[in-house]
Image: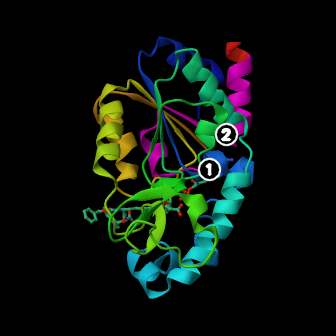
Amino acid sequence: MGSISSFINLLFSSKYTVAFTGSGVSAESGIPTFRGKKGIWKRINPDTVATREGFLKNPVFVWKWYLERFKTLEGAKVNYAHIALAKLEKKGLLKAVITQNIDGLHQKAGSKKVIELHGTVKKVKCLKCGKKFSSSIASNTLPPTCPKCGGLLRPDVVWFGEPLPEKTLNEAFQEVSKTDLLIVIGTSGTVMPAAMIPYLAKQKGAKIVEVNTEETPITAIADLFFKEPCSILFRKLMEEAKI
Ligand code: BJW
């Protein structure tokens, strides 16, 4: 457990604070998380919609599922946790956000340095030539095909069994190597390699602050743990710190 005043002290005494977020940071924007009682994976098997094999077996089904999700994600509004992180960055108190989310809400809230580990809702890519396009291309005939080479287009996200984009992962590890305070928000910390980030930061001597409605494996290494919905916790933090 932690007190807001200790969080504020850490925030103001740290030289390089980084946030690491998961689907829980967007839960209060009405976006379902993956695990947990009402999680996406309770309703649909990830092997069907979040693997390359599942996609190749039935691209139209996977596309219908993603188009529905894209609609929800693109229509979602930022919540106070996204806003607070953007404000902290503007004030020079936060250097980067490393997110596992594809929803683009950190950018929508005004965060500038956002590292998207698992891709983005904004783009699709060709399975054949690798070229990327805006996801608006995928709204007509399904499955959409590449205007350049005719190959099958897929969402530009990272599915199970696929490596994370090397450049992006390296960028995230760079941030982790520099951080002396990692704020971990709304992730179950179960999906590798992203889940290594808090442990790598801890190993390098960074303080870890975790904000989550439930305990996670990360809680054991957290210096401060706030068991609260993140928008509520960040409102208290920003008010008490007068930011
Ligand atoms: C709140 C809140 C509120 C709620 N406030 N908090 C062992 C070692 C290494 C790897 C593996 C391994 N075993 C298996 C693997 C492979 C696999 C993996 O890790 N599987 C585990 C599930 C076991 N990993 C992979 O396959 C990755 N690739 C890989 O390892 O490649 C290796 C390779 C190298 C070279 C060649 C080939 C391969 C890829 C992982 C891709 C994950 N993709 C997804 C889908 C993205 C696209 C999409 O969105 O459609 O990413 S799955 C899903 O999980 C999504 C998320 O980003 C990710 C993490 O989930 P997250 O964000 O943590 O959500 P939840 O639901 O788990 O947690 C939400 C939390 O919020 C909860 O704790 C709540 O309590 C909390 N919360 N409301 C604060 N208001």
At a point 67% along the width and 55% down the height, the residue shown is 73
Horizontally, is 116 left or right of 104 in the view? left
At a point 39% along the width and 50% down the height, the residue shown is 194
The answer as to whether callout 2 falls within 8 Å of ligand 1 is: yes
- In-front residue for pair 45/8: 45
Q: Does the magenta stretch include residue 217?
A: yes
Residue 136 seen in the current view: yes
Which residue is denoted by mark 2 in the rendering? 230
Sequence-first tag of 2 and 1: 1
Q: Does the magenta stretch include residue 202?
A: no
Q: Do the residues labelled 2 and 1 touch (CB within 8 Å)?
A: yes
Which residue is denoted by mark 1 in the rendering? 24
Callout count? 2
Q: How far apart are marks 2 and 1 (CA)?
A: 8 Å
Q: What residue type is labelled 1?
A: Gly
In the image, farthest residue toward the bottom: 57
At a point 49% along the width and 50% down the height, the residue shown is 100
Q: How many residues crowd mark 2 within 10 Å: few (<14), some (14–19), many (20+)?
A: many
- In-front residue for pair 134/204: 134
Instruction: From this view, report whether residue 107 is shown above or below residue 101.
Output: above
Instruction: State the extent of the magenta-drawn residues as a range.
Output: 214-239
